[in-house]
Image (cartoon, helix red, strand yellow):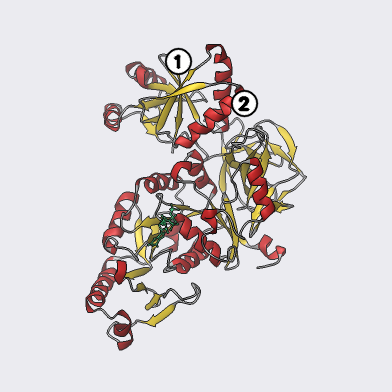
Amino acid sequence: MSTETNWNNARRCTFAIISHPDAGKTTMTEKLLWFGRVIRKAGMVKSKQGDYAKSDWMEMEKERGISITSSVMSFPYAERAMHLLDTPGHKDFSEDTYRTLTAVESVLMMIDSAKGVEEQTKKLMEVCRMRDTPIVTFMNKFDRDAMDAFELIDNVEKICSIQCVPMTWPIGDGVKFKGVYDLKNKTIVSFRESNDPNDPIIVKADDLDSDEVKNFIKDDQILDKLKEDLMMVEELMPEFDEEEFLEGIMTPVYFGTALHNFGVKETLDMISTVSPGPMEREVKLEPFDDSAQTRMIKPNEDKFSGFIFKIQANMDKKHRDRVAFMRVCSGVFERNTKIHHVRSGKDVKIASPLIFQAQDREITEKAYPGDIIGLHDTGKYQIGDTFSEGEKIMYTGIPSFAPEIFQKVILKDPMKAKQLDKGLTQLSEEGTVQLFTRHTTREKILGAVGVLQFEVVKHRLEDEYGVRGEYESYPFSGVRWLRFPDDKTKSSFMEKNSSNIVYDVKGRVCFSVRSEWDLKLVMEKNPEVEFFKNSDYR
Ligand code: G4P
């Protein structure tokens, strides 16, 4: 798929990797890019150098102090245009990580096989659940000591409430890891250090008592365990069902090691085969409140539409511009053609939309459903903003997610209270951080899912609004958006729990959580009130 025409016509596969830090997301990303022929050797994503991004692009990033190289990584594979969206983890974990998941059609879940499902994966999985996103699972690091394969499957099924279907099976683990058994083709797939990732060792294994298999495994205990396991797999595990996968209730599971290539190609083949292309999405019609009517927009509709799911702030004082990431949902986006920015009611002409195509990050003339484009933003755009060809529509499903860390700003100069208010309101409207107001004291509290968000707020308040403050942590551990059956229930609940009531930036009533135990108790006492972890009430 080298020509532009082929790339343009290829069905999009827009996906993301969810994992806990250190489970191997970067390593897997590198391998996927290698298979997509975007990089020639591993080690380039992490070090952010080498031949996978154009040098002038890197210069621009350095100069502007923004790192967007890895936000979207695109490559052709199996006649599809693959778009891998980055889900920042570690110290970069923020609400953007969650929001990215609203822009993809499928997800690859990476699990460290020694640890099972970890905290961050669990949280990201909850977000996937909101849209029933199809999930492919990869159990990584089998070249190290791992949990038993059945135990791992059980762990995923219990924690993620999803039916697992193994597609391969590990043969040994740690230093005794021999390879994976391909359950469909009844072959053993393995690698030696010298093997090209595209050219594994394949051992015919429909008869596990054959000399070929015995000579390859060379360990009776491991072979016996494999035989036993495979009998149990046949007895206990269901067949892969594509429909259930598409509904997000079943996940195909691959075992392997991203570092040593085991299982990587099979996983990519699966994603490129079964992951859906751009799907229809729901929009609200005017007025965009809770009473709004909705309609589904199909990707093949003539008219262009899309929404912003992420805004990358610039941390460099000299350059205030930002990049807003827009997901194209229908029609064709064309450079320099007027498009309608629904929230402001204004038409805008995008002169330099960036596309993240194959090896290049360059200005594009066109973009298609499933594509992500970067828009230069001087502060006009907000998360969730919808663009259309004039129709007053608003994409749904880009909610605020319940923050878990809270801070209060204490002004150094009390004369700056107005600027602080303005800055916080603006930053929260943009989606940088969430702002809550306490019902009783009217105190303003900032909420975030990652500490990086507070750093951005601090930096921008100083830089753009001239507000210096001290940041003190606040003893909330979460918030829940509330829905009441009627006004009477609402006022009685608010009266009884007034010290826990906070309002979000849109004035919606939320319950501030002091402890999980506390929350459980209040929920039990008020079964008629619904508590939601996101502002979309899903
Ligand atoms: P992350 O992006 O999810 O945080 O994980 P990353 O890929 O950076 O992997 C975390 C560590 O685990 C890295 O080692 C990486 O080499 C290692 N790793 C990833 N996949 C495998 C695997 O299949 N087997 C084994 N044995 N290790 C794996 P590091 O020492 O922390 O970093 P580095 O110096 O190797 O880059």
> In terms of image quarters, where does ligand 1 lie?
bottom left
Question: Would you name the residue on which mark 2 appears?
Answer: 464
Query: Residue 513 at x, y = what percent?
Result: 35, 28
Q: Quadrant of the N terminus?
A: bottom right
Give amino acid for label 2.
Answer: Glu
Q: Which is more toward the observer, 156 or 193?
A: 193
Marks 2 and 1: which is nearer the front? 2
Q: Is residue 411 above or below residue 106?
A: above
What secondary structure is found at the residue carrying circle 2? helix
Image point 64% across, 46% down: which residue? 61
Give amino acid for label 1.
Answer: Arg
Going from N to C along the chain, the mark reached first, 2 or 1, is: 1
Query: Residue 105 at x, y = what percent?
Result: 52, 53
Q: Which is more toward the observer, 241 or 263?
A: 263
Q: Is residue 321 above or below residue 229?
A: above
Quarter of the image holding residue 382? top right
Examine the rendering and report whether any part of residue 108 can be seen: no
Question: Would you name the residue on which mark 1 appears?
Answer: 442
Q: Is residue 473 left or right of residue 3?
A: left
Label 2 near ligand 1 (CB < 8 Å): no
Marker disc for residue 491: none
Query: Residue 159 at x, y = what percent?
Result: 31, 49
